[in-house]
Every structure is written in C-alpha cells, then in structure tokens.
Amino acid sequence: MTSSYPAARPAIWRSLLQPQMITCAIMGFASGLPLYVLIQLLPLWLRSEGIDLSSIGLFALIGFPYTWKFMWSPLMDRYPLPFLGKRRGWMLISQLSLLIAIMALGMFEPKQSLSPIVLLTIWIAFSSATQDIVLDALRREVLQDQQLGIGNAIFVNTYRIASLIPASLAPILADHLPWSWVFCIVGLFMLVGVLLTLNTKEPIHASAASLSFQQTFVEPFKEFLHRFGLHQALLICGFMLLYKLGDSMATALSTPFYLDMGFTKTQIGAVAKHAALWPAVIGGLLGGLLMIRIGINRGLWIFGGVQMFAILGFYWLSISEANLWQLALVIAFEYLGVGLGTAAFTAFIARVSSKTFAATQLALLTALTAVPRTFLNASAGYLIEWLTYPTFFLLCTALAIPGMLLLFKIAPWNDDHNLAAATSPSADKH
C-alpha cells in the first residue's frame, strides 16, 4: 500500500499535461463564459440599472434551452455540418453565435428595452446549450474511462475560471466604461473557443448513418433504459435533479445579495468573485485527484456533505454585520464545497453515459441538472422577498438533503464496481 502511492503520483501529474487535458481546459472556458454572462453579469447589470429582484429572478427562465437540449441533441449525433466535421462544425456555429449575441446585449437599456434583452438572452442560452451538447460529447469521446475523473475536474475548473470575465472583470470595467463596451469585451473572449475549434482534431465517430430518423431519437434513451432498468434509470434522473438543488438555489441571486448587503460593484468584482472562484477551482482539482484514490461514489458522499453544510455560511452572513473578510471567508467555503461536489457529480454523469450516444445521453443528464437552475431558481427572488434572506438560506440547506439520501440507491459507499461494470465498453454494446 505505501509503496504504490509514490509510484502512482507521477502518473497523476503527467496526466494533467496530456493533450486531452489541455483540450478539456479550453472547452471548460468556452462552455462556462456564456452561462456566467447569464447568471452573474446579467443580474448585476439589471440590478445596477434599477430592475427589481422579482423580475431579475424571472430571468432564470431564459435558461430553458439547457433543460430541453436533449430534444435536438440526437441531430448532432447523426448529422455533421458540411465543414470541419460532426463535432467541430457545430462548435464553430454555436461559438460565433454566442460571440455576436453577447456583444449585442450592450446595445440596449434595460428600463427602456427589456424585451430585446430577453430575446437576446434566450438566444445566448440556446447557443450555449448547443455548444455544451457538442463539447460534452467531444470530451466523452477523447477521454478514456480512467481519465474521466481528472478530465472532468479540469473542465469544471476552467469552466469556473471563465467566470472571471463576466463576474470579476466586467463589474470592474462597468465602473469605468459604458455597458456597451463591457459586453463587447466580454463577447470577444469567445474567440478562445473558436481557436480551439479551428485547431483541434475531429475524433473518430461510430457511423450513425445506418440509423433511421426515428432510431436517432429513440435508440439513445432505449440503450440507457436497457443498461440500468426502468427503476434505476428513474432514480438516476431524480438524482440529477436533486443533488445540487440546494447550492444552486443558494447562489442563484448571489450578486444581488452582495449588492443588497452594501458592497460596491468593484468590491464584488475584486473580492467576492475571487473568493468564490479559487476555492472552487482548488476544490474541483482536489476532488478530481482524490477520486483517483477514493472512487466516484465516496466522492459524492463526502463532497456532497461539505457542499450542503457550506450553504449555512450564507445564512450566517445574512444575519451579521458583514465586512469584506467575513464575505470572503463564507464565499470561499461555500465554493470549495461547490467545487468538490461538482467534480464528483460531473464524473458520475460521464460514467453513466454511453460513448455510442454521447451527445444525446449527456445532453439529457446535464439538462436535468439545469432544471433547478432554470425553473426553481426563477422563484428565488419571490422567496427572498417573502421569507427574507436568512430563512431563504435555511430553506436551501434543507433542499440539499433529498439528493444526499438518494446516494443510498445511486452510489452506495462501497459499491463503485457495480456501476462501473454497468457502464463498461462491453455494456455499451448492449
């Protein structure tokens, strides 16, 4: 036991420098940027322009494409575009669409032109969800099964690092530049994804041309049910909905919460967002490395417990005379838990998916995780105004419990091998 660990350690660190991991890192940045525009920069912009909390909360509904992306994902498994290949063609179209739409947001004033802003944000969500379908499938195709934990951890980390642009750089710029310039600068960062698309290699795909149009939509779901059975498949889908429900709701309106606590946009950009980002990055990378040792199931238990307990920090913050140090401490612990929990969660999602139908199955599972963020988070503004912040954060803590209870059925503490067998390449061929 003691002699194996030093031997394994170099292999772990060498894996971080493999080309697949660099690809995962850039994919994470390109995937995270548009989402953080919607969930962090947009609320900050609207609140600073005098839009009320209830209306801002309703903007969470624009994320419905994230919850329905499995409806058009089979088309991306079957039909390549006439340039760059099946994955890279769809990547380029979605990334250019995001670049233009984000830049266009700054052309409007929220109090005078809210309807065009709503339409643009819906288009950003649709383009972002489309990009995620392709990036998730590409990541599943380029990673070996033993690379899933660390590869997804790297993806999640750079996904969160992307938040530096809309959640840190943009608020600071907004104190010195017009919002039109701010959105132009943020949008141009999508060129990182475009450069990846143009310079990466298209993976070798199993041909889907032999499938009928009906089979293109039916077979991915049929294969998933065949592998797990109806009962277990439903439990997995329920777990997708509930595991991150509590922390998702707790952070849904975090930026307006910081503003309501009396902090300036510059303080939020320079302190609060960094206190959230780097612990989440550390937590994600640490979670990925630890899962090599403890497995995905135990990671879900341990990291989920930390994630749930950390929500109480926001409750403490809401009943205190907050200062910057207290704000940074609470946010750092919360996002350390978020980073750990997300690392295990994304590895679990990848493990239960099939490489044969990567785009469709990953779209379905990740869409389920977006349901709380899209629909339940839309009620966050009303709940806060009705319950007040302290009671709201206690409610969020309670909402984290059902997902943890499902671990008894979904990921038993000492039972990683059974699920691994169900998702092995041989099972993939059903």
Image (tube, rainbow, N blue to C red):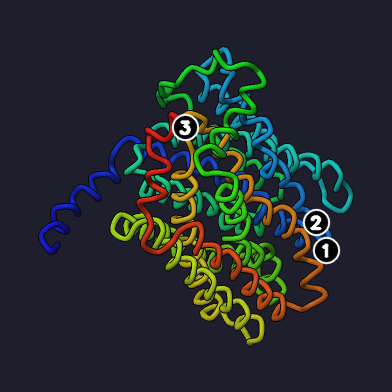
Q: Residues within 10 Å of mark 2 (few under 14, many from 20)?
A: some
Q: Position of residue 347 (x, y in %)?
A: 44, 49
Q: Could you classify mark 3 by the number of other residues whose Cα lies within 10 Å: few (under 14), some (14-19), or many (20 or more)? A: many
Q: Residue at x 56, y 76 (%)?
A: 327
Type of the residue with mark 3? Leu
- The residue singled out by tag 3 in the image is 138
Coordinates of residue 411 in the picture (x, y in percent): 46, 58
**Residue, disc 1:** 54
Q: Say the numbered circle drawn on residue 58.
A: 2
- Work out whether residue 64 or residue 145 is closer to the camera in this orientation and state it: 145
Dots 2, 1 in contact, CB < 8 A: yes
Image point (75%, 41%), residue name: 122
Residue type at mark 1: give it.
Answer: Ser
- Real-space Cα distance between discs 3 and 2? 32 Å
Task: Indicate the amino acid at tag 2.
Answer: Leu
* Residue placed most toward the observer, 150 or 251: 150
Determine whether, in the image, residue 313 is placed left or right of residue 415: right
Q: Quadrant of the N terminus?
A: bottom left
Between the residue at mark 1 and the residue at mark 3, the CA separation in whole angstroms equals 38 Å
SS at circle 2: helix
Q: Residues within 10 Å of mark 1 (few under 14, many from 20)?
A: some
Q: Secondary structure at mark 1?
A: helix
Give the foreground label among 3 and 2: 3
| Quarter-of-image position of residue 199 | top left
- Foreground label between 1 and 3: 3
